[in-house]
Image (cartoon, rainbow, N blue to C red):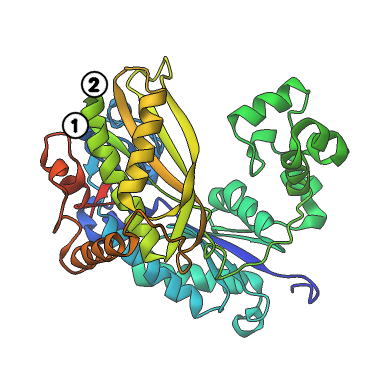
Amino acid sequence: MANANKRIVFLVDMQSFYASIEKAANPQLRNKPIVVAGDPQLRSGVVLAACPIAKSYGVVTAEALWQAQQKCRSLVVVRPRMEMYIRISMQITRIFESFTDKVEPYSIDEQFLDVTGSVHLFGDVLQMAAQIRRRVWLETGINCRVGIGENKVLAKMACDSFAKKRPEGCFWLKRGELADTLWKLPIERLFGVGSRMKRHFHRMGVYQIRQLAEMAPDVLARRFGVNGEVLWRTAQGLDDSPVSLQTYDTQKGIGHHMTLPRDYHTAADVKVVLLELCEEVCRRARSKQLMGSVLSVGCRGADLDAQTGFGRQMKLEEQTHDALVLYEAACCLFDRHWQQTPVRSIGVTLRQLVSDNVLQLSLFADYQKRRSLAQAMDDIRTRYGQDAILRAASLQQSGQAKERARKIGGHYK
């Protein structure tokens, strides 16, 4: 039984989420190696999800589709259907909410559940986890894994490092047993340690999580700043953050990024997409009744080996969610930092967000008229679709607004 003084947190992860949905929707695919991937012709030929059969051939998520096809000649490629994936993710959330009112989405296929107050209604901790897994399977045809801990970081590591590798699909990672479980793993298995941090730790002679956990936290803080202490706390299984429905309510930035269907060689072509990105960012800001005062523009070159491109930001004269104001500033950043090299992808982000219920008036600009016009355009797009009204520039060959309107998260609906 659970200790009454400790929280019980689940991290529930859907196995090969997109691929599992496709197999559930089409039983003929059940025993075949499948991947969900975009269109290589549009530079979206990346594996978004691979089923366990495909993974047995060495196929991994985020690799190029052509690489996956070389590993498995019989690979079945399914194009993503994002609307359906989002709908099923929300259906799974409703299943979780029948077990506890404290459900926090972590990603489209992972969610935290604080079951401290409701676990007694479903037997014990492991019985409850098994019931959740069974409900998800019966109602969606998707296999899920459950990591269990007294906080979110332990539940996450329990799922990623242990539950995913066990036939029962569950694992309870207890703080009192870390020396026999988590600490035996290599340092790169610690949540928050990526390839770069792994190299830093290896240069320090730290190869195992145990070594990090036994270090003095102030030594790590001097070397890596706040992140050093955070990683030490993670290794110790310490995390005070609650499972909260409001975790993502406060946004720090609103951005939109896209990979272009071909290399863009001229500033005129790139600026068409810049205008479209500014339109989208400002539309989303207005929908949340927010304005921003810091603009970031990121541009990646076509030569990935040379790592051409730039990422720069600037402070705006005032808060705004006006697309033309943002576009003018974006063009300024682009003209200043672009090195005349082909552009592969570009993004725009608006930061330092504040409520738009207070506006600095100007004697020289009719903000209210422009604001009303923008709102009218937003209303038309909400009612009739994102491509129902476009700026003339988007009708050029370099424009991507009409194509983007057919997608969610860069993939077709």
Residue 127 against residue 371 in the figure, above or below: below
The residue at the far bottom in this view is 121
Task: Check the picture and name the quadrant holding the C terminus.
Answer: bottom left
Task: Check the picture and name the quadrant holding the N terminus.
Answer: bottom right
Residue in front for this viewpoint, 117 or 352:
352
Residue 388 against residue 35 in the figure, above or below: below
Give percent across and percent down for residue 343.
Answer: 30, 25
**Rounded to the nearest whole Å, what is the CA distance between mark 2 and mark 1?**
18 Å
User: Label 2: few (<14), some or many (≥20) within 10 Å?
Assistant: some
Give the residue type that dot 2 points to: His
Quarter of the view holding residue 36: top left
Quarter of the view holding residue 52: top left
The label number, if any, that marks residue 265 in the structure image: 2
Rendered residue at 29%/32% (across/down): 65
Disc 1 on helix, strand or loop? helix
Does any portion of residue 337 appear in the rendered image? yes
State left or right for residue 144 relative to residue 389: right
Residue 340 against residue 118 in the figure, above or below: above
Q: Earlier in the sequence, mark 2 or mark 1?
A: 1
